[in-house]
Amino acid sequence: LRCLPLSRIQSSKHRPWLECLMASSPGVAGYPGSRRSSKSIGSVASSGEKGRLSKLKTCVCAASAQLGREKSRLLKLEQKYVQRANRVLEREEVVDDLDSEAMRKEEELVERREHFMLQELHVSQELEALQQSTREAQQLQAVLAERHHEVLRQERQQMRQ
């Protein structure tokens, strides 16, 4: 049997159970049926106290049944608590997995962004070089076109002369 907490035993609701438990437990002074009682075991055997002892023992059985029900209820509560705790742990593991996956993807995105930034820098440098080459080619073309016109004018002048 498990003992009730002292606060519950001292309440008036549980005092009869306490008396029953104390009466059936050997060695508790001051309660009928106790070996430490001021009365001897033989003197407890009077008919009035014998009826009281049998009622007390019946009360112990009732207390025992009550304690059994309470124990069963507490075990069920403990089982529910353990199940809830396991579900919480499983959820935390899932959240941790999702968090690590999100962090991994974020790191990949950072790497890709850096890679794209480097590519963009390289492409912009190439674009600048191409634009410079285009400007130079346009200037050269303009110079060549000017020379070509100059040569054509000179040839016309020579043909006229």
Image: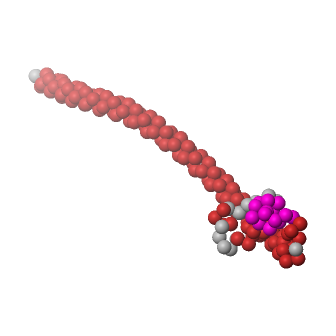
**Image coords of residue 9 (percent x, y):** 68, 66
* Residue at 54% over, 47% down: 99
Q: Is residue 90 left or right of residue 71?
A: left
**Image coords of residue 43 (percent x, y):** 86, 68
* Residue at 77% over, 60% down: 28
Specify the segment rendered in magenta. 28-41
Is residue 21 visible in the rendered image? The answer is: no
* Residue at 36% over, 33% down: 121
In magenta stretch: residue 37:
yes
In magenta stretch: residue 20:
no
Residue in front for this viewpoint, 55 or 41? 41
> Vertical placement of 102 versus 2: above or below?
above
Residue that protrudes farthest toward the left in the picture: 161
Magenta segment's dominant SS is: loop
| Residue 76 sits in quarter | bottom right
Residue in front for this viewpoint, 156 or 73? 73
